[in-house]
Image (cartoon, grey):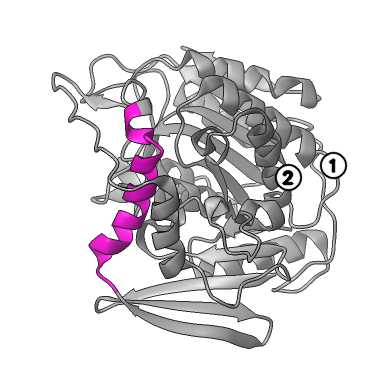
Amino acid sequence: MAVLFYFFSQDTLHRYFITPGRVIESVHIPITQSAIEKLNADVYASMRLYDLAVNRAPRLRGLKPDPPPKPVLTLQKALENAAAILMPRAFDERFQHLIVVPAFSIGAFPFQLLQPYSDGSMLIDKCSITIAPSLMDLVAVRKRIIQKIGSGSLYRMPVEISYTLENPLFIANPKYPSDGQYVYPDLPGAEKEVAASLPFAKNYKILKGAEAVKDSVIRYIRGCDLAYFATHGMSAQENPLDNNFLVLSGQDPYFTSRNIVQLRDSTGRGVQNFPDMVILSACQTGLGRSMESGITAGLSRSFLIAGANQVIMSLWSVDDEATAYLMSRFIYHLRQPHEFSPAEPLRLAELDTQAKWKDPHKWASFSVQGVIY
């Protein structure tokens, strides 16, 4: 296992590749913030994600959405350009898990598609990946896990973990507000996605349609072991505590980062019985471009602050059938003992999905935010 840490300052991206007690590589790359953002945009455009999501993403009411950007590079070329910036030369088959501490929109990059190996295979073929919002979050959540399990170290826990899904909460395709600033397209595939996971749960609560109001979500999330949101998500760089939110139903439909952080109790230890894991299968605007301080760094980090150890995050959402299959396979693998969980179960689920759908936009759409066991 290794840590890949990025830090940006004065038009320079500092990239550190670290293993226990050793900095393997320290590289300083002259690059602008816009050029870093373009790494994501080129890969997303080459997969035509903007075209595929045009009818699914929220849009400003009364305005016709801008035409999606056209690809200027092949996917292979876009990935090669990104790998030259993002991947250390010392990375090889020795590393079975990679923790990424990102800068800017690097946290929304689909690392699993990169090809860092001499045989040309992809990262997902041999290595699982976790995104830690910051070094501070990495240490804080790791300490919380150590206290819960009662063993291990800040860097590595030699244990296999399985999830039983004793009492999960599912939120699927709420009745979206019809009078707000944005129009939120209906997501009927969200219900199919959740239904595919139900056979793996012992007891569960589903809030869908008009039932998916904020008060009910707050009430039931306090006693569940996994919270699964299949809905729209929004992000913004200004006032992120209030402008980053998941869309629910009712008169107050926006479950904001502020609402989530406030679930943390006054002792600072997180709400009692807060779910270990949160899944955010949220259709998002921007598809990676607006995630710099929004969905990735905002909502997912808010759930980590509130008490979750991991947030499973959709980077994009464009295919109902493939996403439903991927998430059902993830829940299946999650219930088996694994090291590097839940990143390893997600890797296996994406490989299962890749076997059915070769297009990477259908199987490379999720990442793990937080800290593995």
- Which image quadrant for residue 228? top right
Q: Amino acid at mark 1?
A: Gln
Q: Residue 39 lies in magenta, yes or no?
A: yes
Identified by mark 2, the residue type is Pro
Using the image, determine if residue 351 lies above or below residue 112: above
Q: Is residue 285 left or right of residue 349?
A: left
Q: Earlier in the sequence, mark 2 or mark 1?
A: 1
- On the question of residue 291 being in view, the answer is no
Provide the secondary structure element on which disc 1 rests: loop
Q: Position of residue 210 (x, y in %)?
A: 46, 12
Give the residue at mark 2: 345
The boundaries of the magenta stretch are: 31-51
Give the SS element for disc 2. helix
Main SS of residues in magenta = helix
Residue 52: in magenta span: no
Closer to the camera in the image, 277 or 54: 54
* Mark 1 lies on residue: 336
Of 77 and 244, the residue lying toward us: 77
Residue at x 67%, y 44% (from the top left corner)? 346
Dots 2, 1 in contact, CB < 8 A:
yes
